[in-house]
Image (tube, rainbow, N blue to C red):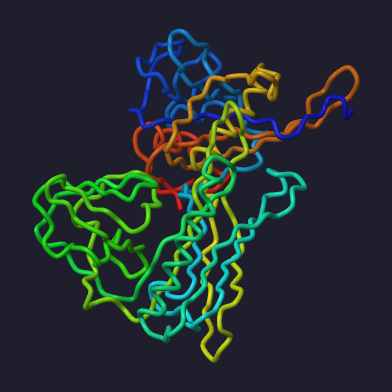
Amino acid sequence: MALDSKNNIKSVFIVPELAEVTSGTITPGSTGATGSVVVANMSNEVLTAVTVTDYSKIKIIKDRGANLPLQQVILNLNDIVAYTGVAGEAATEQVDYIGYNGTSGSIRVTANNFYTVKLEHVPNSFAYGKRPANYKYGTYQSPLGLAQDSVGQGNIATGLVKSLIQNFVPNRSIDWRVKAELTNSGSSIAITGAPTSYKFTRWSKVVTYIGTDPVNLVANTYLRVGTTAADPIYKVVSVNTTTNTITLDTPYQGETATILAAGATVIIVASIGLDWGIKITGIKQKYDVNRWRQYDKVRFNTFLEGFPNDATPTTVTTTAAFDGVAVYEQVANDEYISWGDEGQIFVDQTPPLFREQDAEIGTQYNPVVLGWLNNLPSLIGAGENKGQAIFYIAGSPILTDQGLTLVEVLNAWLTGKFTALPTTLV
């Protein structure tokens, strides 16, 4: 009997934001909109929430265009054992604060002291096998005469950030990286003179602004990339009003981006806060579904060595990384593997097999899942088979267009068997 059994059969449907199809007979390209997903009978006639109740067996069909076969799966009402749907959630990276975290905390100061920040990578055992944890360090020797004040904290925080940046330069093309930036408890204000936007380039000290010259953003002030006390700051070395450029003391660590004027503020010298900190953020990993399908987040432990262990020691505040729910990488993985159940049998090979992909980079999806279980008789016994039809609905969890219609038709088909899904997924 086991010879006839198969578990975890997946049929993955990517449901883009398109207008619903409410009638007609589906053939390749017939909907006029590549990506249309419908519920149909065995004759490929589109069913509605009213007509679907006449059928115990239905098809889910996706029109993938005139040049590709229909994607489809047949479902029997008596086989359905689960019906769930949830809102997708965006992924986030791990963030550790050493000292000031936007609310509290400070760098404890000792003169003529060797400070060390030790970062331990916590590798995903599934992604990296039995590879041992590895470490990166940031170090700083504090000079004589430092006191527990803003200058002392600023020297130590800046020295450690520069060391961390330098020590991670060799890691820029491999599998785990973080960015290190300064934080300060001082209040930032709007940049007067009102440039309209700022172009930040990753790993560059030069920021280009567009519009009129800034007035209160000058040498030795701090440019805050954001508006809250938890946002990172960069010391300004100079402003060139001829080339419309701002030179920073340390290279910008974020992704290259243009930030509108309201998204950047300035801490003037008189407003530098007493408390300083270091913000360490995991950097999103490279991902290519056709070459490597291991979606992962950078996770690490932060250890402090040589920091004063006094009555109010320097603390580390951690916000863990979150993989997200139905983010592109997860959806692309599911779709890629599911093609094994659609006839593309070789999943891993060299060179890699480039499978057809409907999941779109950067799109947030919302998963709706039908679980099924059946016993298929054969000449040598009855094998128990189970699997899922998974619908990744693009866009907001407030369902609209064909995503809304799909859920409404499934709700009607499963009336009396499962609780209807809300049209706003939670």
Q: Quadrant of the N terminus?
A: top right
Q: Residue furthest bottom?
A: 311
Residue 9 x %, y %: 69, 30
Residue at 47 percent across and 50 percent down: it is 89
Q: Decide: is 130 above or below 38.
A: below
Q: Decide: is 50 above or below 99.
A: above
Q: Quadrant of residue 24?
A: top left
Q: Is residue 199 left or right of residue 421?
A: left
Q: Quadrant of residue 173?
A: top right
Q: Decide: is 216 above or below 209.
A: below
Residue at 40 percent across and 80 percent down: it is 152
Residue 35 x %, y %: 42, 23
Q: Is residue 74 left or right of residue 108?
A: right
Residue at 45 percent across and 25 percent down: it is 37
Q: Residue furthest front?
A: 144
Residue 382 x %, y %: 85, 27
Q: Quadrant of residue 321?
A: bottom right
Number of callouts:
0
Residue 243 x %, y %: 16, 44
Q: Is residue 301 left or right of residue 17?
A: right
Towards the viewer: 117 or 82: 117
Towards the viewer: 208 or 359: 208
Residue at 41 percent across and 61 percent down: it is 181
Towards the viewer: 212 or 249: 249
Q: Decide: is 193 above or below 384.
A: below
